[in-house]
Image (cartoon, coloured by chain):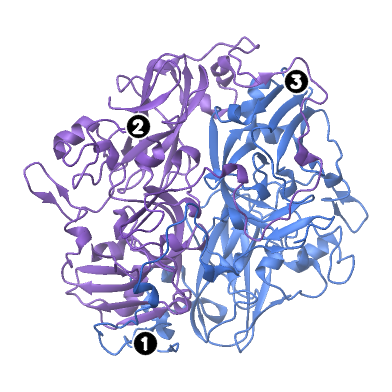
Chain colours: A blue, B purple
Amino acid sequence: MSIRKTRKNGTQSPEPVAGNGLLDRRVLLGRGVALAGAMTAGVGTSLTGAAAEPLEVGPWSLGPGVPVPPYGQPSKFEQKVVRTLSNPKLEPRGSAARTPHHLLNGTITPNGLHFVIARGGQTDIDPDKHRLAIHGLVKQPIVYPLDALHRYPMVSRITFVECGGNSAPLYSKEPIQASVQALHGLCSCAEWTGVRLSTLLEETGVDPAAKWFIAEGADLPTMNRSIPLAKAMDDAIIALYQNGERINPSNGYPIRLLVPGYEGNMNVKWLRRIKLVEGPVMAINETKQYTILRPDGKAWQFYFPQEVKSFITHPSPGLNMKGPGFYEISGIAFSGNGRISKVDVSADGGKSWAPAALQDPVLSKAFTRFRMAWSWDGSPVVLQSRATDEAGNVQPTRAALIAERGPPRGTPNVAAFTMEHFNAIASWGIDGKGEVSHVYA
Amino acid sequence: MSIRKTRKNGTQSPEPVAGNGLLDRRVLLGRGVALAGAMTAGVGTSLTGAAAEPLEVGPWSLGPGVPVPPYGQPSKFEQKVVRTLSNPKLEPRGSAARTPHHLLNGTITPNGLHFVIARGGQTDIDPDKHRLAIHGLVKQPIVYPLDALHRYPMVSRITFVECGGNSAPLYSKEPIQASVQALHGLCSCAEWTGVRLSTLLEETGVDPAAKWFIAEGADLPTMNRSIPLAKAMDDAIIALYQNGERINPSNGYPIRLLVPGYEGNMNVKWLRRIKLVEGPVMAINETKQYTILRPDGKAWQFYFPQEVKSFITHPSPGLNMKGPGFYEISGIAFSGNGRISKVDVSADGGKSWAPAALQDPVLSKAFTRFRMAWSWDGSPVVLQSRATDEAGNVQPTRAALIAERGPPRGTPNVAAFTMEHFNAIASWGIDGKGEVSHVYA
């Protein structure tokens, strides 16, 4: 079935609002405002008259299907929609599993596709034998079995988690040709439900000397991080549910700490212990790892929130264009400092910008899906997105970020030590054939 | 590890705000407002002093885990968290798969656990061979392949779908002793993403004579329903994604119609055809099924929105109490007519009520999680929830609904024909031993 470039109702295209064919957000409303014009290069195939039976009947319509399973799995035709694994055989090093954002849409990441960083593989914990202890500088240390935690007041929150090392490939000297999954796949968003840490600390009481807490996991490497006590009193959650069901084993079943907006590794999985202390424990993940070395040799340490970021998922490298005409440019924006207030999109490498539509509800520290109507004339273009959060932070250009952090150090095409918290604008180049590549612009 | 009834800090319990121990919503905030008092019957186990190593080390902490899988599955310890199936061997009759709400929390239903009604089993469609036709009273009929649909402007919406026959067991003459899953499991909530039907109708054009549309599925029974064209122009979605990933096969992969708030069967799965027409087609599901027979022998037909409803998931039948003390009462509320504006909870069978906390964000035509703080003294109680929507509709008592609809007709304990749109208040009785049962109160 061919893609047609023209349609028959003779309406006019709306005027572009920025270079290379970006169209006004009202085009997206689908309520008679100019969409017909935007569809000058309609993508459906018109029929000649109203055929009584315009469709072939597929074999699936000619016989019964299969039984509905107790726990549904994605279609067998979607087997490519999986996480990519850095360590599929669990050799003695860390494992990363990346979310395929270029194959997803909306804002929720299904539990099977949520990104993972695990230093010791996926820990399979028997929930009946697992406990959470809160101790240290408290008035009354308490050990909570799982069934006890389920009696406390709970809270649900849709929030993202992002690895501090997400997007690190964009720090390399030359643009790495890879999908959004490879470049930005270490972030995901889910609805988490659990007990506020502050609720449990009301019960244990807090010694006035306590200023930090250490969160420790039950995995083999005993993952631990130091977090200011103020975060516990603000919005930290002892999470028990992920998108409605109990947390996935790769994401910390049966308990993970959730510190919304903070660096991924601080959201300690397989949580077994919260210890209130006077100062940080100086764990490997806050000394050797997850510090940002500046050009002058000093380092940023205890750098918690993930900064404002956005990237375009559709189109993106690997998702090539199917001829000129109308497209929706769509992507994800988020900030560890609050709500997204604006996402601008450029189709001319940053010379001109137009505001994208933000999908409601726009939630604090959650993925926000942005959408931009676009009429592509087939010429080479460079697509970019630039997010702003409610605190006024604006996603920097790559040049500005590197000017601040210093040039890439480490092995060719691999950034080392300076790779954390890379939140600069990403650029997708589209050539005259419609091939999409990663470019620096 | 025993459950303790007392704690040591000597704070006082807050005053109840309704009968049998319902507590003020502020208790839920976990910000120093009275929770400590509410926890007079604390549920954790206090330690005597701050033990240096209060936890046993589980075997999972002593060796590496397993490799992170490409597509994660729930923990092996959660194998009971599945849909219950009415027709596991696909005998020649319909199939129902019910959501285990008593084992979930939050508002999102994972795709593997979304409820299903299927007349011909789960239809496995090859997306490359599937088409959506829009024809009938349009100016230009169009057939859309899947890859064409992906170029149109999309919208995401968190919304519930509920079978018109959900909660029908509550119509039986005696209260059926079964879990929330069996009683209320034919409703679920997900983030759906796709193209507005109105967007596609802008392209096809609409003949002014068109007043309805017929949506038809590609399953063996060729599921079809008539829907007013106004719904297409309002908020109907040609859905392609469910919670971020492509729609689950049991829920209509690769395309389902979504008509937010309307009776479940109108959200036609495996959608292949939208035909614009002057009047309804009088399909089996709008004549024999899904009409409500009144006592006077007339029937309500084309009764679209699912009315305001709520039910308590925790505690609920099968989830028995673990001794007196603090609990969170929690449940789900929703309305096909908009947002939930209020949920009241009673612990004395409707004599006194207190407003529950509603979890943000409260979205139109979506599940809203409500929560109520409760101090149970161990006496027999009857728990109820009563939802109100922004249109002012209030969930009726069972007695009021039956007075309107007429007494149960059909075989004992099975309501027939009069079972649709049952949205009355449900009651859970708790006896002195903490056993929870379904009661009529």
Q: Give the label on residue A7, or none.
A: 1
Q: Earlier in the sequence, mark 3 or mark 1?
A: 1
Instruction: Count numbered badges in the picture.
Output: 3
* B284 w.r.t. A150: above or below: below
Report the Cα–Cα distance between label 2 and label 1.
59 Å
Kind of element beneath mark 2: loop
Q: Nearer the viewer, residue B156 or B279?
A: B279
Kind of element beneath mark 1: loop
Q: Position of residue A228 (x, y in %)?
A: 75, 35
Q: Residue at x 37, y 16 (%)?
A: B19
Q: Residue at x 71, y 73 (%)?
A: A178
* B238 w.r.t. A158: above or below: below
Q: Residue at x 80, y 75 (%)?
A: A174
Residue bearing mark 2: B177
Judging from the image, mark 2 belongs to the subunit labelled B
Residue furthest right as drawn? A297
Report the Cα–Cα distance between label 2 and label 3.
49 Å
Report the Cα–Cα distance between label 3 and label 1.
72 Å
User: Callout 1: few (<14), some (14-19), or many (20+) C-alpha neighbours within 10 Å?
Assistant: many
